Image (cartoon, grey):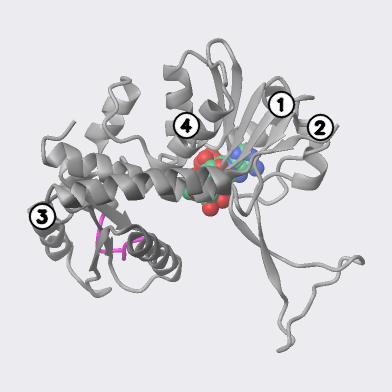
Amino acid sequence: MSAKVIDCVAIADEIKNKLQKEIETLKKKGVTVGIATVLVGEDFGARMYRKQIEKFCDEMGVQYTDKNPPADASEEDVVKDVKTLNETDSVSGIIPLRPFPKQISDYAIINAIALNKDIDCFHPYNMGKLTLGEITFAPATPSACIEILDREKTNFEGAEICVVGHSNIVGKPISILCLNRNATITTSHVFTSMAGNLAKHTTVADILIVAAGKAGLITPDLVKEGAFVIDVGINRVKLLDEDGNPVLNDKGKPKSKTVGDVDFDAVKEKAGRITPVPGGVGAITNMMLMRNAVKAAKIQHGID
Ligand code: NAP
């Protein structure tokens, strides 16, 4: 039987509507919810992400501030910019958009963000609190995974969960959030794969959360029958025709499409529930960021 495909776009829309009302109510109380991004230079991926954040701010009545020092800005100057944003009342949350140029250390910027404006939980203090289960802001993508699992009434206690990927912003915090809910966690990564042990861990998982950034990594043989598969990965791949040849656009260039880390069509025949890509975790991630911005504004204004 084919898996239930989770309608993440519908979940995101529902959260968006609820947040929009909350933002309106706060506005009436004189509280501005605002997000600032810090992008140093002109990195393409970071600019794309910034555009997305700006669009959501505009749609949802959130004030947007763009801090964009030039690529040759000094670390000291960018830290100064962050400190100014810390002091700006209309900025509730600050999002550093990486990668930064070589002369700027990620940690110098992240450590400069005020703890109660760190809405994607980059600061080591907030990550420490997350680990202890005293969460102020859980990072957006891991929160999106938890939101999906909660809405599907997942019983975390004792559940076997395998997370593929152990990055600081996705795999590691997802593992911690699930562990805090008393699940049994296996966190696998590239060394697990290199040791030939990936299947050993993924095939016993009731819940498989994949955040590796490798298109087609998860095939049906790596999935337990009936498992809940959450695909966090976002990859651009060439669009191929039935014979495996690249499909070309009007200009003769290969067309591309967005896929996850899971071989969706094949795995959906084995899994019990599955999230798609596109229109999956990413849609909810954006709303988690907005939810944290609203929470930050409330904290900063002493509102429960
Ligand atoms: P990352 O920093 O590159 O981390 C990828 C992780 O996957 C690493 O821990 C890596 O292990 C592991 N990995 C790579 N190849 C593997 C393999 N063959 N077998 C097992 N593990 C493997 O990426 P990230 O920032 O965590 O993002 C992961 C993916 O999620 C990307 O596709 C990204 O675009 C996507 N993403 C989606 C959202 C969303 O909202 N949907 C948000 C953020 C990111 P090692 O560290 O040991 O090399």
Q: Which residue bears the numbered disc 1?
A: 227
Within-10-Å neighbours for mark 3: few <14, some 14–19, many 20+: some
Q: Quadrant of ligand 1?
A: top right
Q: Nearer the viewer, residue 19 or 88?
A: 19
- Crowd band around label 4 with a 10 angstrom C-alpha radius: few (<14), some (14–19), many (20+): many
From mark 3 to mark 2, how far is it between C-alphas?
A: 50 Å
Q: Please tell me which of labels 4 and 3 falls first in the chain.
A: 3
Give the position of the C terminus as an image quadrant: top left
Q: Residue at x 66, y 46 (%)?
A: 276
| Residue at disc 1, secondary structure | loop
104 within the magenta span: yes
Report the disc number at residue 83. 3
Under tag 3, what secondary structure? helix
Residue drawn at point x = 42 percent, y = 48 percent: 16
Taking 170 as reference, is 122 left or right?
A: left
Q: Amino acid at mark 1?
A: Ala
Q: Is residue 208 above or below residue 78?
A: above
Q: Are marks 3 and 2 in contact (CB under 8 Å)?
A: no
Residue lying at the far bottom in this picture: please name it.
Answer: 251
Q: Which residues are magenta?
A: 99-105
Q: Mark 4 or mark 2, which is nearer to you?
A: 2
Rendered position, 224 above or below 264: above
Residue linked to disc 4: 174
> Camera-side residue: 220 or 138?
138
Which residue bears the numbered disc 2?
270
Instruction: In this rendered view, identify the residue nearer to me: 50 or 102.
Output: 50
Q: Where 63 sits versus 298, above or below?
A: below
The residue tagged with tag 4: helix, strand or loop?
helix
